[in-house]
Image: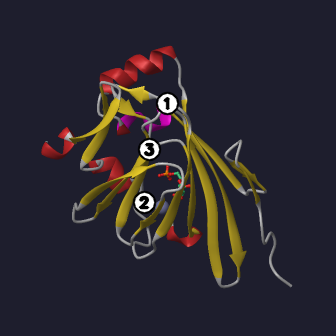
């Protein structure tokens, strides 16, 4: 009668769930061009190619809808003082929003409209953030433990990675004396 599965089971200890249809990993080499300090990226990649984040997703597909539940785990780490983060994206269908829910760890959500209105939201476990339509979004792990967050979105929203790859976000999240601070993205001034 109903398409399956109707429910899935989240594991609070592992930060994962079953069943899931999609699983992907992003290593430093996949994300190299996103970090500001390219020399630091090259030095880090000579040593190894750490896992920066992974995510699972389960679309709840029906003939009329495709609401999707995902969980992303960002590992603790920095390159050139910049914290590990997701690639970040706009939705191809710009009008479709998303919900992010911080489950574990500490971090920041970066939001930026197409017109360049920028906002950073501090995350602790329990923070729920709405990503409005027409807004690029990136999560950053500013802690020294894993950052886990859930996402709810329509699969048909799609991912536009190109815009973020070209211009980045208005501000970078960097470590200063062990604490996260926001600094203007020098690439924007070029
Ligand atoms: C969340 C959702 C996914 C996204 C994933 C990783 O789970 O927003 O749609 O793919 O995070 O983020 P990104 O695609 O920006 O690398
Ligand atoms: Zn999204």
Q: Mark 1 sits on what residue? A: 144
Which range of residues does the magenta coloring cover?
29-33
Q: Is residue 32 magenta?
A: yes
Picture coordinates of residue 7 (x, y %)?
Answer: 77, 67
Q: Quadrant of residue 112?
A: bottom left
**Residue 27 falls left or right of residue 7:** left
Q: Which circle, 3 or 2, is nearer the viewer?
A: 3
Q: Residues within 10 Å of mark 3 (few under 14, many from 20)?
A: many
Q: Mark 2 sits on what residue? A: 160
Picture coordinates of residue 61 (x, y %)?
Answer: 70, 74
Q: Is mark 3 within 8 Å of ligand 1?
A: no
Determine the residue located farthest toward the right in the rendered image: 1
Dot 2 and dot 1 residues touching (CB under 8 Å): no
Cα separation between marks 3 and 2? 23 Å
Secondary structure beneath dot 2 equals loop
In this orientation, which residue lies closer to the viewer: 51 or 93?
Answer: 51
Above/below status of 35 relative to 95: above
Cα separation between marks 1 and 3? 10 Å
Q: Which of the marked residues, 3 or 2, is nearer the chain's N terminus?
A: 3
Q: Quadrant of residue 37?
A: top left
Q: Which circle, 2 or 1, is nearer the viewer?
A: 1
Above/below status of 12 relative to 153: above
Q: Which of the marked residues, 1 or 3, is nearer the chain's N terminus?
A: 3
Above/below status of 78 relative to 134: above
Picture coordinates of residue 167 (x, y %)?
Answer: 27, 49
Q: Quadrant of residue 153?
A: bottom right
Picture coordinates of residue 154 (x, y %)?
Answer: 56, 71
Q: Mark 3 sits on what residue? A: 107
């Amino acid at each position: 009668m109903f398409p399956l599965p109707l429910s899935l089971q989240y594991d609070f200890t592992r930060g994962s769930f079953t069943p899931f249809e999609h699983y992907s990993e992003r290593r430093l080499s996949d994300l190299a061009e996103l970090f500001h300090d390219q020399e630091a990226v090259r030095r880090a990649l000579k040593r190894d190619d750490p896992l920066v984040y992974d995510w699972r997703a389960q679309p709840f597909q029906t003939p009329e809808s495709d609401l999707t539940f995902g969980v992303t785990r960002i590992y603790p780490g920095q390159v050139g003082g910049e914290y590990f983060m997701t690639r970040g994206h706009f939705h191809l269908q710009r009008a479709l929003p998303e919900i992010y829910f911080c489950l574990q760890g500490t971090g920041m959500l970066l939001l930026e409209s197409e017109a360049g209105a920028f906002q950073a939201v501090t995350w602790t476990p329990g923070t729920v953030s709405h990503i409005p339509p027409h807004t690029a979004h990136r999560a950053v792990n500013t802690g020294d433990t894993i950052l886990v967050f859930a996402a709810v979105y329509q699969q048909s929203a799609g991912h536009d990675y190109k815009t973020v790859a070209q211009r980045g976000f208005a501000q970078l999240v960097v470590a200063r004396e062990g604490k996260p601070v926001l600094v203007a993205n020098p690439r924007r001034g070029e």
